[in-house]
Image: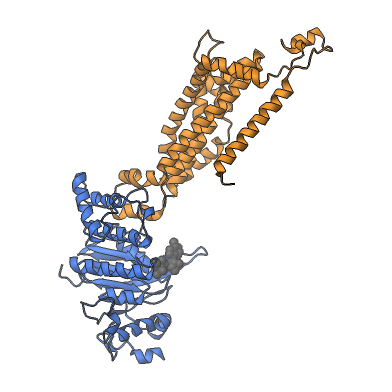
Chain colours: A blue, B orange
Amino acid sequence: MSSNKFISIEGIAKRYPQPSGGTTTTFEDLWLSMPSGEFGCIIGHSGCGKTTVLNILAGLDEPSDGTVIVDGQAISGTSLDRAVIFQSHALLPWMTVMGNIAYAVSSKWRKWDNAKVRAHAQIYIDKVGLTGSEHKRPSELSGGMKQRVGIARALSITPKIMLMDEPFSALDALTRGTLQDEVRRVTLETGQTTFMITHDVDEAMYLADKIFLMTNGPGAVLAEIVENPLPKDRSRIDLHKHPQYYALRNHIIDFLVTRSKTFTSITPNHDPRNVPVVRPAFTEAVVTGASVMPSLASATR
Amino acid sequence: MITSLRVRAAVVSIAIFLAFIGVWHLATRSTGTAATMSPEYAKLMGLTANTGKSAMPGPLDVGAKLWEHLKQPFYDNGPNDKGLGIQLGYSVGRVGLGYLIAVIVAIPLGFLIGMSPLMNKALDPFIQVLKPISPLAWMPLALYTIKDSSLSAIFVIFICSVWPMLLNTAFGVAAVRKEWINVARTLEVGTFRRAFTVILPAAAPTILTGMRISIGIAWLVIVAAEMLVGGTGIGYFVWNEWNNLSITNVIIAILMIGLVGMLLDQILARFTRMVTFPE
Ligand SMILES: Nc1ncnc2c1ncn2[C@@H]1O[C@H](COP(=O)(O)OP(=O)(O)O)[C@@H](O)[C@H]1O
Ligand SMILES: [Mg+2]
């Protein structure tokens, strides 16, 4: 699909009834779209509703309002087209590595015989570097290896979209780095459309083409879409050597530290259907929505 | 000091056992003629009373009798004189049958209750009322409706072993980790396949724990049930030997009940280990 709106979240809201009566609104009238083959990251503070957005996209949760359109069709419920990589990896502990991936493969291609399922699963086990661990159980694997299985399981069903909810937050820095490389390599190789939640600014800068900044909840809004100015062939090690690195990083950190709290009050006429797109550089350049987007310098005061 | 805990525990176990046998032997050995006993009373007290020997058999009597039983566990000399093996066989058979029916009923019903909050709420009052009823309280009703003592005993076993399995299955199914269910959902796994490939293996350790509790209760209840309905079985054997005033046989039966109960428990424990997965 060449459409600019391969994924289109259209005015979704999530409200929960309060025990005392009334409702809490996690977010309201949220619009977000992404073209095919892109890597999008949501960043925002805990509790702002990132997981909720991702679960709605996955079909695991339902919005109180609005719809999600994927590849021209409104989604209803879960689908093999949208694979989820869970934060807690969610491997089935009574199955081996091969068993876990084969379970996904045989769920997608129900008519395949056992040999074909295993051969297909093996490709993805090899792809994430787990060759030789096929017959281990999840309890015998390290955290990083478990998450590799999770990634292989998601990739093995060749989904249209891969959804990841803080997939590496439970891992140590070294393992996280290798897995980020792995994910970057695989997604570039396959042109996989990917949507990820993270807390880690560097992770977002390395992996994402677009970074979606969410303000604090309740009543969170998508404040800004940051286009990643770093070159497509960036590597994790030299990320900080790019001239735009600090401009981008400071912009995001500044948002998380100050603007995520104050955004709603300073920007009363924020249009959720027309979220400003920003491409941080040495001089803060606003690509669209210039009228609602104050410059970085004034926002930090 | 270096000997393992296991070996030391075994030594203590053997010492306790020998001490018990020793005390038992001393407490029950002959004390000469019991002069003060009137002949009528002695008669009432059984054959051994006026020989001065305690009516309570000693460990040697029990050992000798046990050896006799073990040499010939399956003899059958009519309704009131059958080998211990045959009697235990009847009991194990009844427990097995009642228990099997309970498994067939409890596990699917437990799945239904665990998966459906509606059924959980709807069936809860019935379970709450039925569960605390002593299984033996059902016996007259069973005898009246079924009109067969052996089938009634099986029914009683069914009713006592159904509850722990039902509740554990329902609990295990309801407590399956949401993320595992979500994995199945994102893979578009149908309800039936999900039940067998995700919920059953995830809940199996809890279900097996319930089954283990059930087999223990069933074995407790069968002895009492057979005492009531009579005819065959280890419970009937105990009662019959009490009526024959053969305390030796009663003690042997008690020992056997314990051993078979342990064996049943160990079998279920092994199954539980087989389905338990490390996380
Ligand atoms: N079942 C629920 N009832 C009430 N509030 C909920 C429920 N589930 C989530 N929330 C609220 O929704 C908000 C968003 O949660 P979540 O999407 O998990 O946030 P994030 O992933 O950004 O940390 C949280 O503030 C949480 O309190
Ligand atoms: Mg979250």
Residue located at (37% from left, 63% from top): A87
Q: Is residue B94 left or right of residue A125?
A: right
The quadrant in which the N terminus of chain A is found is bottom left
Task: Give the farthest residue toward the right.
Answer: B36
Q: How many marks?
A: 0
Q: Where B59 falls versus B180 (above or below)?
A: above
Residue B66 drawn at (x, y percent):
58, 18
Which of the four quarters of the rendered structure image does ligand 1 lie in? Answer: bottom left
Residue A187's spot in the image, x, y percent? 22, 67
User: Residue sitting at 24 percent across and 60 percent down?
Assistant: A155
Q: Is residue A112 left or right of residue B274?
A: left
Q: Quadrant of the C terminus of chain A?
A: bottom left
Camera-side residue: A38 or A155? A155
Residue B254 visible from this viewpoint: yes
User: Which corner quadrant of the image does residue B192 belong to?
Assistant: top left
Please tell me whether residue B141 is drawn above or below residue B34 in the rendered image.
Answer: below
Q: Name the residue nearer the viewer: A19 or A5.
A: A5
The answer, for residue B163, to whether it is visible in the render is no
User: Which of A113 and A197 lies nearest the eye of the viewer?
Assistant: A113
Residue B247 image-quadrant placement: top right
Residue B130: image quadrant is top right
Residue A208 drawn above or below residue B261: below
Residue closest to the far left: A2
x and y, in percent, of residue B110 in the image? 44, 40
Q: Position of residue A149 (x, y in %)?
A: 30, 58
Q: Residue at x 30, y 54 (%)?
A: A133
Horizontal arrangement in the rendering, residue B78 relative to residue B193 (left or right):
right
